[in-house]
Image (cartoon, rainbow, N blue to C red):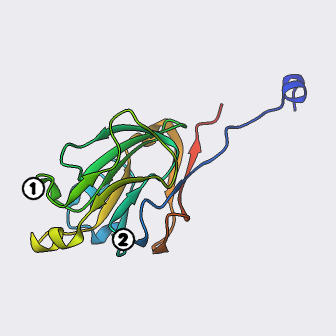
Amino acid sequence: MGLFDKLFGNKQPANITLKAPLNGELIPIQEIPDPTFSECVLGPTACFKPGTDGTVYAPCDGVITQIFKTAHAVTITSKDKVEILIHVGINTVDLKGEGFEALVKDDEEVKAGQPLIKFDQEVIARAGLSNLVPMVICNPTDFQSVEFTTPRAVTTNDDICTIIPQSN
């Protein structure tokens, strides 16, 4: 331990945790019927099978970077600079907003657990589309590692991702 460590402490930044963005089930990404998500093209990905409430919640404190005009997807930048994409359903952009309601707007500050999007699973099902909800960490190279927990039932109170910051 060096003199500066003794005087000032050798503080590493704390790990970052993200909550589940909905109540439902965390499932293996191989079950996503879209290679963009199942092959983690956009970054490390988790996938959720929604329960019955049809609401996406903020997985952390942050700022809404973009709520898509069709309200089928949202991006959030956490206070720790994690860039997160939450995408409701697969190919649901084709619904042109039908069955989706944005509960936030661009540049809005949000708290973990705050509702972001309401979606109607019946509208998605009638269109023959998947209601799976991928969540992607879009800037993983800014961090030492990004790890999602193993598949299981989840609620919005559950930590589902640990992100280790770069060492100083």
Residue at figure coordinates x 38%, y 32% from the top left: 107
3 left or right, relative to 117 = right
Few, some or many C-alpha atoms within 10 Å of disc 1 (few <14, some 14-19, many ≥20)?
few
> Which callout, 1 or 2, points at the residue further toward the start of the chain?
2
Q: Position of residue 45 (x, y in %)?
A: 37, 56
| Quarter occupied by the C terminus | top right
The amino acid on which the numbered mark 1 sits, given as a three-letter code, is Asp
Eyeballing the image, is 131 above or below 42?
below
Q: CA distance from mark 1 to mark 2?
A: 22 Å
- What is the tally of numbered marks visible in this picture? 2
Camera-nearest label, 1 or 2? 2
**Left or right relative to 11: residue 122:** left
- Where is residue 140? Give x, y as percent: 44, 43
Q: Which mark is residue 155?
A: none
Q: Quadrant of residue 69?
A: top left
Q: Quadrant of residue 108?
A: top left
Q: Quickly name the residue at label 2.
A: 53
Q: Is residue 150 above or below residue 17?
A: below
Instruction: Name the side, left or right, on which 51 lies relative to 154.
Output: left
Label 2, residues with CA under 10 Å away: few <14, some 14-19, many ≥20? few
Q: Residue at x 90, y 23 (%)?
A: 3
Indicate the quadrant where residue 28 lies. Answer: bottom left
The circle drawn on residue 94 is 1
Mark 2: secondary structure:
loop
90, 67: nearer the viewer? 67
SS category of the residue bearing label 1: helix
Residue 96 x/y as whole percent: 11, 52
Query: Measured from the top left, where is residue 84 in percent x and y?
Result: 40, 46
Q: Nearer the viewer, residue 151 or 122?
A: 122
Type of amino acid under label 2: Asp
Could you tell whether 146 is left or right of 116 in the image? right
